[in-house]
Amino acid sequence: MILSLNKKHVQALKAGTKLFHLTKDKRWKVGMEIQFYDGLQLNKGVQFSEGVCTGLVSVEISSGFTVHEFTFNRPETLNEIAIQCGFESWDVLYAENKGLNCRMICFEY
């Protein structure tokens, strides 16, 4: 399945710091092959890597990061989660996704 990423997420994936991706898309399943695209495929995006979905976790982004009814709220932990999702910091992830209930795709590439 295609996973289209913006420039900052492409750079994080290529640098090896992006380990997860947040999505509202319910079609993802463990074991699915991933085609990583730089930009939208429909707008002449370019595939730059392949991987596999190794896990899916339901998350909620509020004042903390909630996974399975456990909320991470220590600033150091939140920043680490944000970086592993391809964001510069928790402040950026939170500003762009506040109140979001979604799934976190875990992958190997």
Image (tube, helix red, strand yellow):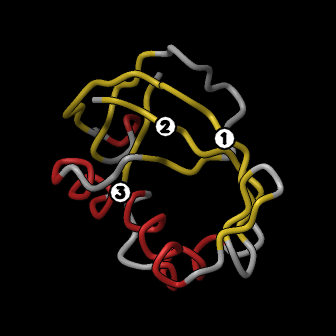
| On screen, residue 40 above or below 108 | below
Q: Identify the mark nearer the N-term, 1 or 3.
A: 3
Neighbour class for label 2 at 10 Å: few (<14), some, many (≥20)? some
Distance between mark 1 and mark 2 Cα atoms: 8 Å
Q: Amino acid at mark 1?
A: Val
Tag shown at residue 6: 3
| Residue 25 picture quarter | top right
Q: Identify the mark nearer the N-term, 1 or 2.
A: 1
Q: In which quadrant is the C terminus drawn?
A: top left
Residue at coordinates 57% horizontally, 19% vertically from top-left? 30
Are the residues at dot 1 and dot 2 in contact (C-beta closer than 8 Å)?
A: yes
Residue at coordinates 34% horizontally, 30% vertically from top-left? 108
Q: Secondary structure at mark 2?
A: strand
Tag shown at residue 106: 2
Foreground residue, 18 or 36? 18
Seen in the image, is 15 located left or right of residue 62?
left
Q: Identify the mark nearer the N-term, 2 or 3.
A: 3
Are the residues at dot 1 and dot 3 in contact (C-beta closer than 8 Å)?
A: no
Residue at coordinates 72% horizontally, 54% vertically from top-left? 67
Q: Where residue 94 sits in the image (x, y, percent)?
A: 60, 78
Q: Where residue 77 sits in the image (x, y, percent)?
A: 50, 72
Q: Amino acid at mark 3?
A: Asn
Mark in front: 1 vs 3: 1
